[in-house]
Amino acid sequence: MPKIHAYHVTPSIPDRLRCLVDLAYNLRWAWDHDTIELFRRLDRDLWESSGHNPVLMLGTIDQGRLTKMERNEAFLAQMDRVYRDFTEYMKDSGWFAKACSDGHQTRIAYFSAEFGLTECVPIYAGGLGFLAGDHLKSASNLGLPLVGVGLLYQKGYFRQYLNADGWQQETNPQNDFYNLPVRPFKDSDGRTLQVSFDFPGRKVSASIWWVQVGRIPLYLLDTNIPSNFEEDQDITDELYGGDREMRIRQEIVLGIGGMRALKALGIQPTVCHMNEGHSAFLALEQARIFMEKHGVTYKEARQATCAGNLFTTHTPVAAGFDIFDPGLMRKYFEPYAARLGVPFDHFLAFGRYDPYDPNESFNMAVLASKHSSYTNGVSQLHGKVTRQMVRKVWQDFPEHEVPVSHVTNGIHTRSWISSEMAELLSRYLGPQWYEDPTATDVWERIDQIPDEELWRTHERRKERMIGYTRRRLAEQLKKRGASESEVLMAGSVLNSESLTIGFARRFATYKRANLILRDVDRIKRILTREDRSVQILFAGKAHPRDDAGKDFIRQIIHFARDEQVRRRIVFLEDYDMAMTRYLVQGVDVWLNTPRRPLEASGTSGMKVLANGGLNLSILDGWWCEGYDHQTG
């Protein structure tokens, strides 16, 4: 039988262009318009076909093109300027070092099951990942002493396409890590660093990979290695895939494996931030490490380590928390509880609202909350909702004294604002609008921008969005086997003169994407008026097991096929970060129709505001605090 060998081909980059490799492997390019423009200039078509992936670009670009650009003085001058700006950014310590001179021993570890950093690193599903990615980018700009911890998924979250009836289908293409801006973390012998942990009857290992996000390192664990059993190689295959047993395995790798990875890297966090309950097992491992180091009991170790743990929940309904039945917990944690010196029934009480109920399942949010000094929701309203949800844990407390606060989500503005709008703001406001976005005196200068310039900037982005929409629609119609006339029709959908409404997010039923179809005759009249024409752009994925969410998509597709409105309403398949940017930078109005109070926060509307758009929303999530008659 012939042997199969793996080869990793490294491109031959001329010495004069070597700095492009440094730029490609640091995701600061994802929010720096000058660096993006540099890679576009290197090869505009390849930038698009590579999925905005500079590492893949450099690995596949024609050698003759590199030779030509090596002699292009204008390109070299631009490259040197961009690289000089990059090195100055990396050398600067940022706000934290200046503001917290005594914080040199602080080290924050930020754990999340997903990170939405850029479209070419597909380890995100939606809002939770976008928030985590923006968190790392903001931490980089501030110079926070923070590291990220997550999982590196071989298949990531699913790719979406629709069948002829408009029903969502899913595919899971493999990610080639060696063509992503991701690197294996090597030990002193040049081998990929690994950690291991116990599963029932066996050990499982995970490799550590590394993504540099500006000044912030993100460490990602990957179990797809030959030394593991085949079933364990699949643990880090899919984000939110598999059954409950697969979920508990993933969360062991993230929480316990993540803490062991930090230890192997020589990082001792003073603060562990759990972004949602997926990583809550880290609190157990943190206490175990403390016990072994200081020779104390679990109760003492828990008291000591709780002080440095933070838990952020994004879930507005109790059903959204991850729960595991007692039998599954016994299978994976009975020996672990013995190592902690804790009877197993006491161990299960860590994750129960009622510690004395032997039939209650183990709740990851309860585990995280009981092992944290600070728990927060992600908006003012969500903080109140969360206090009501977890009040059973603190039954003797009045509701207002339940120890749950809120920190309203935000966005990393530079990642979502268009280059045209950023340039306009810099021209009139100076660089401080992005260096210190909280400087209110800077934003007071916004009235100095002539209305005509602001509107022209918005119109340019709207035209680009419509061009993008037509191209994407034609592509998805071709893949579906549509007729030539239908594909040609895609070139005439939408109108840059019409009021354009955007609705793009997860197709969870509580978000009510089909609300506009409650009165079909009325929405038809609105969409077809000639004097005040309106058009709507939809995008979003339903969870593979959410048939009700899939049916919402199908309803919109069927409505969009009506001859009266087919040029006024479009659903774009396979929603991702690149599509998000086109939409939030180009729409006039962002529509948000959740069932209050089920939208914990939401941040897509914030991205629209940064680009001069308006919000039309239910008073839910962040909008309760952000609403002003001048913004929507």
Image (tube, helix red, strand yellow):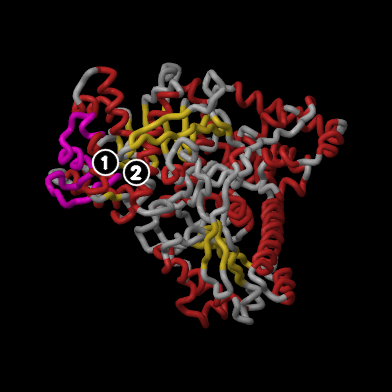
The foreground one among 246 and 357 is 246
Is label 2 in a helix, a strand or a loop? helix
Label 2 sits on what residue type?
Answer: Gly
- Residue at the spot 32% in from the left edge and 51% down from the top edge: 321
Q: Is residue 224 visible?
A: yes
Is label 1 in a helix, a strand or a loop? helix
Q: Name the spot of residue 336 as percent of width and height, x first.
A: 26, 34
| Location of residue 475 (image quadrant) | bottom right
Q: Is residue 590 visible?
A: no
- Image quarter (top left, top right, bottom left or bottom right) of the N terminus: top right
The residue where tag 1 is placed is 367
Asked whether the beta carbons under mark 2 and mark 1 sit within 8 Å of each other, the answer is yes
Q: Name the spot of residue 116 as percent of width and height, x first.
A: 52, 45
- Residue at the spot 50% in from the left edge and 47% down from the top edge: 124
Label 1 sits on what residue type?
Answer: Leu
The residue where tag 2 is placed is 277
Up-down relation of residue 218 to residue 550 (above or below): above
Q: Does label 2 or label 1 sit earlier along the sequence?
A: 2
CA neighbours of label 2 inside 10 A, class few (<14), some (14 to 19), many (20+): many
Q: Name the spot of residue 285 as percent of width and height, x first.
A: 31, 31
| Residue 362, magenta (yes or no) | yes
Q: Is residue 613 left or right of residue 347?
A: right
- Tell me which segment is drawn in magenta: 336-364
Q: Is residue 571 left or right of residue 60?
A: left
